[in-house]
Image (spheres, grey):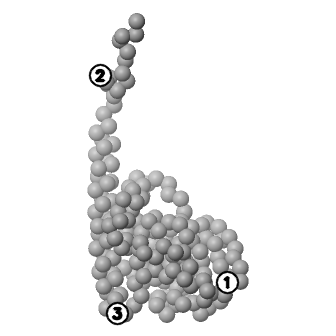
Amino acid sequence: MFDNRINLFQNTDLPDHAGSRAVYAHQYNTALTQFRSALFKGKIFRLRRKLSKLKQDLYDLNALKPDLHVRGSSYAGIKVVSIRSIVGSEGRTTDFDLGFHPLTEAARERWVSMAIAYLSRLPIPPVQLIQVGDAYFVRDGHHRISVSRAFGQTAIDAEVITWKDSPPFPWQPDVCCTANNTLLAPES
């Protein structure tokens, strides 16, 4: 009785998605090229920093907590934050260097997928940062920061929690300061 069933995926005229496949392939190749470039630039960045005897790793906020005298914290809301002012991470310091270059090939899949979202102009949620003094530490969003920086973005939307503390801070001797004493991480 129902011998002539229609299979929606066979013998039907479906729209040609070759155009969207070509766009995706182009975005994937662009993202992969950017990842490889960021990986290579990171090696050069770390070598130059090592030869100059400058810090090359992200500061670990968890390791710094005992030396800080935090007197409280407050929610600062969503801000636009200079990527150069992000100097550390809350515990994840082995994936990226101080310039937010990926350290190993292990980051490739997540990095490339984030780069494709960036290239597709998809809405990307703000990163989560902790502000201590003029410096920022990543709680969530390491790959988003790395991708944004690799594509030449100088600032990023961030949801910020501010820790109230007083200087001096352990990271200040190893970073560059501008004329108005704004904390900045070194350029890559």
Query: For the residue labelled by badge 2, is the local secondary structure a helix, a strand or a loop?
Result: loop
Residue depicted at 40% across the width and 52% down the height: 120
Mark sitting earlier along the chain (2/3): 2
Say which element carries label 3: loop
Asked if the residue at tag 1 contacts the one at tag 3, i.e. Cβ–Cβ closer than 8 Å, the answer is no
- Tell me the amino acid under the disc marked 3: Ser
Separation (CA) of disc 2 from disc 3: 66 Å
Around disc 2, counting alpha carbons within 10 Å, would you say few (fewer than 14), some (14 to 19), or many (20 or more)?
few
Horizontally, residue 171 falls left or right of residue 99, namely right
- Image spot of residue 148 (x, y percent): 43, 66
Question: Which SS class for mark 1?
Answer: loop
Quarter location, residue 5: top left
9 is higher (above) or lower (below) than 154? above
Quick one: 93 or 51, which is closer to the camera? 93
Q: Which residue is mark 3?
A: 52
Residue 178 against residue 130 in the figure, above or below:
below
Q: Is residue 84 visible?
A: no
- The residue tagged 1 is 70
- Report x, y in % for residue 27: 32, 54
| Mark 3 surroundings within 10 Å by alpha-carbon count, few (fewer than 14), some (14 through 19), many (20 or more) | few
Q: Amino acid at mark 2?
A: Asn
